[in-house]
Amino acid sequence: RDQPRSRGLGDVYKRQVCGWCLLLLFVARTMSARDDAMDRSLDETTEMPSLILPYLYLGGKMVARSRENLDKLNIRFIINCTPPRSTDPRAGVPNFFKGDKARFTYRRVPVFDSKGSNLTPYFSSCADFIDQSKHHGAILVHCVQGVSRSTSIVLAYLMKSKGVPLEKALAFVKKRRPIVRPNRSFLKQLGEFERKCMASRQRKQSGSRVVS
């Protein structure tokens, strides 16, 4: 007679444990959503970008529209990682000072922050653009929040021009801008680009050994 009661108490205990697990999961998800909202709010209201390298900044749309801070940081080259407003009035960010051609040079990467977007065609050309521009002024890479698209372009630059592996490049950028979070599709594209960069470096090293 005592045995069924024991099983009953065990069932009650299991239900309590499951209840606590569900509660903890709910709290964790709520805190994560709150942190994401704080990250977005922080980036959308600050006009100061994150310094990644002495000549390279990463930020969101508020940075791109602050002429005062662009001038203060000697930013003269801007990579805008959003579609034009003619394509999407909400997702697109204007090239705010494109009329001042003597001061600013713009390059647009017209992609959405979605799993269907392809950044790969822009990785190499944007890396070259940064390398060519760094001797003439600072560069700002931005999207709407400075979290996913623009971060991916900066990571591609570090891999191609500095030879930094993707994992280390992401840790390096995240230390300087904690809110960065490229979407999974972009991370996959960056992984493929990393392999191409490694193969290219290996070919160059093999060629230099043959010449020497």
Image: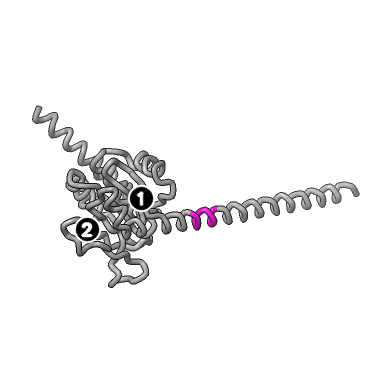
The 10 Å Cα crowd at callout 1, few under 14, some 14 to 19, many 20 or more, is: many
- Residue 19 is drawn in which quadrant? bottom right
Q: Is 34 within the magenta?
A: yes
Mark 1 is on which residue type?
Pro
Image side of residue 166 versus residue 27, left or right: left
In front: label 1 or label 2: 1
Callout 2 secondary element: strand
Magenta residues, dominant SS class: helix
Residue 158 appears in view = yes
Q: Is 126 within the magenta?
A: no
Residue wearing tag 2: 106
Q: Are marks 1 and 2 in contact (CB under 8 Å)?
A: no
In the rendering, at what x and y percent does residue 73 appear?
29, 48
Tell which of 101 and 148 is nearer to you. 101
Identify the colour scheme used: one colour
At 41% from the left and 55% from the top, the residue drawn is 46
Q: Residue furthest right?
A: 1
In the rendering, at what x and y percent does residue 196 appear?
24, 45
Residue 188 appears in view = no
Image side of residue 109 versus residue 35, left or right: left
> Magenta part of the protein: which range?
32-38
The 10 Å Cα crowd at callout 2, few under 14, some 14 to 19, many 20 or more, is: some
Residue wearing tag 1: 49
Q: Please say if 201 is above or below 191.
A: above
